[in-house]
Image (spheres, rainbow, N blue to C red):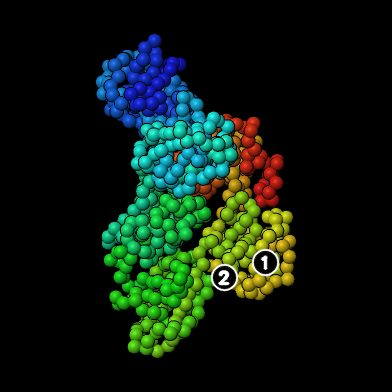
Amino acid sequence: MLHLSEETVRLVGGGSSCAGRVEVLHDGRWGTVNDFGWDLVDAAVVCRELGCGEAVAAPKRAHFGQGKGPIWTITVSCTGVESALKNCGSHGWGKYKRNHAEDAGVICSGIRLGGSSRCSGRLEILNGNKWHTVCAAAFDQQDAEVVCRELDCGAPVQVLGAAAFDKGDTQMWTQEIQCRGDESYISICPTSSSVKYNCTHENDVGLSCSGYTDLRLVYGSDSCSGRVERQYFGKWGTVCDACWDMRAASVLCRQLNCGIAVSVVGSDWFGEGSNETWADVFDCDGNETKLSECSISSWSRAECSHRRDVGVICSGSSLALHDGLVRLSGERQCEGELEVFIHQVWRRVLLDSWSLTESSVVCRQLGCGFVLNFYGSTSSTLEQSHECVTGFQCSGSEAHLGNCSSPQTLNCSSTQQLYITCLGRGSIRLVGSGGDCAGRLEVFHSGSWGTVCDDSWDIKDAHVVCRQLQCGVALSNQQVPAWFGPGSGHIWLDEVECEGNETSLWNCSSSGWGKHDCNPKEDVGVVCSEFKEIRLTEGCEGNVEVFYNGSWGNVCWNQMEKDTVSLICQELNCGRSGVLSDSAPRVKSAPNWLDKVTCRPHDSNLWQCPSLPWGQNKCNEYEVAKIICLEDQTHKSPQSLSCSNSPSPYKRPCSD
């Protein structure tokens, strides 16, 4: 296979130097590239060579008009890591008898977000072949709409000033950008230099985009019920039930003009999907008007599959009148008097014959996490002539109350209404490790976070915490305060005693809220099996190793591409790109933890990237991934240090 000559590349007919028909200079003449096999990977190399940011499109069929010179090459085949088009393979070099109606084109963004992922970071704009950071005072929400759309990153979530993504080292763009919000590219938005701003890199603007481009409910009885699906960069995928709650459901229903959320249900309602399963989590307050206003995190540590695809039923759906739906009548979505829809009527539930098992089904059905407590409350509005229900019997594994044994209906002679309080995933957390699955245990109570004392704490208690956080099982019972540091708030719990099989810490006994005889040096810590860490063995270069299930292991290089390499370097604060090669494992006895890791442009950390399941691989002894990160190594310090310098007790030294 021949390679393109070392000549100049340009884009013609697109209105800027970063969009147009691809032309290359060879033998003193400009010619075009045939679009056979032309794709976004090839376009990305052209954009990189021209310094034009990310590739957003690779149009074919002479999208920017037909060229008039020779057609110099066909079937260009880039891997995506090349620095110039000349380094890509092709089917030869010469005058091909092809039609200029098949000339290839490229559209580059001319903008970029310098952050941990393609869809969030400090905004930089290309102007006159130089990158410029943008002054926060010259940028607003309408401008953000255009940037996120141009980068194919969905909708803006946050516009941040005060150098939220660190200070840039380029020139400042001080003109005011005046987009309407519906433009396709920011380059066609008008600008104004009449307004003067006192702009420095202290005022660099940053932007977080949603990453997703569309949402829908499918396989329901109507458009207001169904399995939740999200679209990333043209691919539809489902949502894991561990990544979704009632607040997010309420925002989605509002966004779809479907009223309010009635229930969050499992795959037994609307079936299992067949495409991707997205692990990103919408963290909503519940009062947003659309999901793009919610922040997105990678909180979930659950093993997601299509068996756990989540669905939503909104009040605007005919399914909102389906037997077995539940609602809580309190001021907050996850607490209040329980009502269940039975025989086409909403009925209150009596405390009689009710247990923790049924409560757990209700909290799960509402997407509200775990049960905090339930009790009888006296209702002054209840009339004896009204019908109530009692006698539900659940195993605890049901997705909704309608799957439990049928209840009895009777007159409401008892005034002991059932009152339930559910606690979502945000009620406990592990702090101080850099990950969600290891750290100092903190619990949320009475409006503030506090710690747990280590008196009576053992591995059974730690197992419950790991289970509640969907972090696997406890690896060890860490009570050494120096590991994760003492807390600074209240000590909320002491003398916690769990059997080990509880689904939530709130099901375990303790001495009561705020009752203790401890000091912060006795704060308990937990390390769970799903705690993950990544490192390169020599700081910003070396074999890729990950910590999982209590040990460091290898990452194989099979199917690893530039997006994965780039993400690893960015996550370790070692630059934005790197060179991949294969290597022998550093420790022959170490497990091969990951294989076929294929990160996508919207992934913000390695754990969101698709791969084979943990421990399953097709690696031989010379196929361990080795990466040398290229950009700004001398000015960066990796977040995950080289083996010999690693200070954390849950990381193994390089001699392991």
Name the residue located 60 percent from the left edge and 31 percent from the top edge: 632
Which quadrant of the rendered structure holds the C terminus? Answer: top right
Q: Check disc 2 and give the amino acid type.
A: Trp
Please, what secondary structure does the residue beneath circle 1 have? Answer: strand
Residue 430 lies in quadrant: bottom right
Q: CA distance from mark 2 to mark 1?
A: 16 Å
Residue identifier under label 1: 491
Name the residue located 61 percent from the left edge and 63 percent from the top edge: 449
Crowding around mark 2 (Cα neighbors within 10 Å: few <14, some 14 to 19, many 20+) is many
Name the residue located 39 percent from the left edge and 72 percent from the top edge: 326
Rendering coords of residue 481 (x, y %): 72, 58
Which quadrant of the rendered structure holds the N terminus? Answer: top left
State the residue in front, 233 or 463. 233
Name the residue located 45 percent from the left edge and 36 percent from the top edge: 176
Depicted 528 relative to depicted 211: above or below: below
Depicted 210 relative to depicted 413: above or below: above
State the residue in front, 264 or 174. 174
Depicted 583 relative to depicted 482: above or below: above
Examine the rendering and report whether any part of residue 307 can be seen: no
Q: Check disc 1 and give the amino acid type.
A: Ile
